[in-house]
C-alpha cells in the first residue's frame, strides 16, 4: 500500500503529533471497510471532530484531500486483488466504486492502464 499511496509528503509547521494521530485514525477508519461509501461527516464522527476540521487537518498532514486518499487507497487494494478476480466489475463494486466504468476510469487515470490491461500483463508473467 505504501508504494501505491506514497509516504506523507507534507511537513507543514502545523502538522503536530496530535494532528498526525487524528489523520491516522481517519485513515484506519477508511481502511477498515473499503467498500463502504464513507461520507465526510461519518469519518469525522468516527474520529470525533467536525468535518471542516478533519478536512483542514487531513489536507495539512497528507497534502491531499481525504476523498483523494480514499480513492488511492481503494485503487491500491485493487492492485493487490487483480490476480484474484476474474470479474473486474465485481472487484470494483467490492471496493466501493459505483460502476465498472468509474472503477476503470479511476484506475486508468492513476496507473496509465485499465484494470483489464494490467490484469493481462500480470498473467503474461
Image: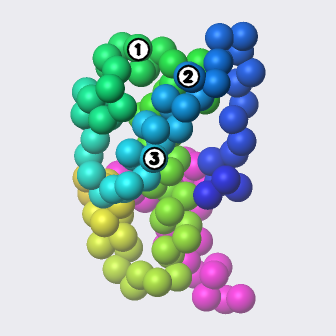
Task: Tell me where residue 41 appears, x and y as whole percent.
Answer: 25, 27
| Foreground label between 1 and 2 | 2
| Lower position in the chain sequence, tag 3 or tag 1 | 3
Q: Is residue 49 left or right of residue 79?
A: left
Residue sitting at the far front: 18
Which numbered circle lies on residue 53?
Answer: 1
Mark 3: which secondary structure?
helix
What residue is shown with label 2? 19
Q: CA distance from mark 1 to mark 2?
A: 10 Å
Give the magenta part as a residue range: 102-125
Magenta-colored stretch includes residue 61: no
Q: Residue at x 72, y 10 (%)?
A: 13
Q: Residue at x 30, y 35 (%)?
A: 46
Judge by depth and name the residue closer to the eye, 45 or 90. 45
Task: Tell me where residue 75 appears, x and y as whole percent.
Answer: 50, 56
Judge whether residue 101 can be spotted in this image: no
Whether pointer 2 and pointer 3 mark residues with C-beta atoms closer than 8 Å, the reply is: no
For the residue carrying disc 1, how many other residues have a C-alpha within 10 Å: few (<14), some (14-19), or many (20+)?
Answer: few
| Lower position in the chain sequence, tag 2 or tag 3 | 2
What residue is shown with label 3? 28
Mark 1: which secondary structure?
helix
Amino acid at each position: 500500500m505504501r508504494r501505491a499511496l506514497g509516504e506523507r509528503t507534507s511537513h507543514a509547521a502545523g502538522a503536530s503529533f496530535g494532528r498526525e494521530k487524528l489523520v491516522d485514525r481517519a485513515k484506519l477508519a477508511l481502511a477498515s471497510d473499503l467498500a463502504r461509501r464513507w461520507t465526510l461527516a461519518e469519518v469525522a464522527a468516527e474520529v470525533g471532530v467536525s468535518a471542516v476540521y478533519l478536512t483542514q487537518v487531513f489536507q495539512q498532514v497528507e497534502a491531499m484531500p481525504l476523498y483523494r486518499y480514499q480513492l488511492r487507497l481503494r485503487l491500491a487494494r485493487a492492485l493487490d486483488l487483480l490476480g484474484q478476480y476474474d470479474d473486474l466489475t465485481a472487484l470494483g463494486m467490492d471496493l466501493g466504486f459505483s460502476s465498472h466504468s468509474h472503477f476503470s476510469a479511476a484506475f486508468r487515470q492513476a496507473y496509465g492502464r485499465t484494470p483489464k490491461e494490467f490484469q493481462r500483463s500480470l498473467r503474461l508473467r
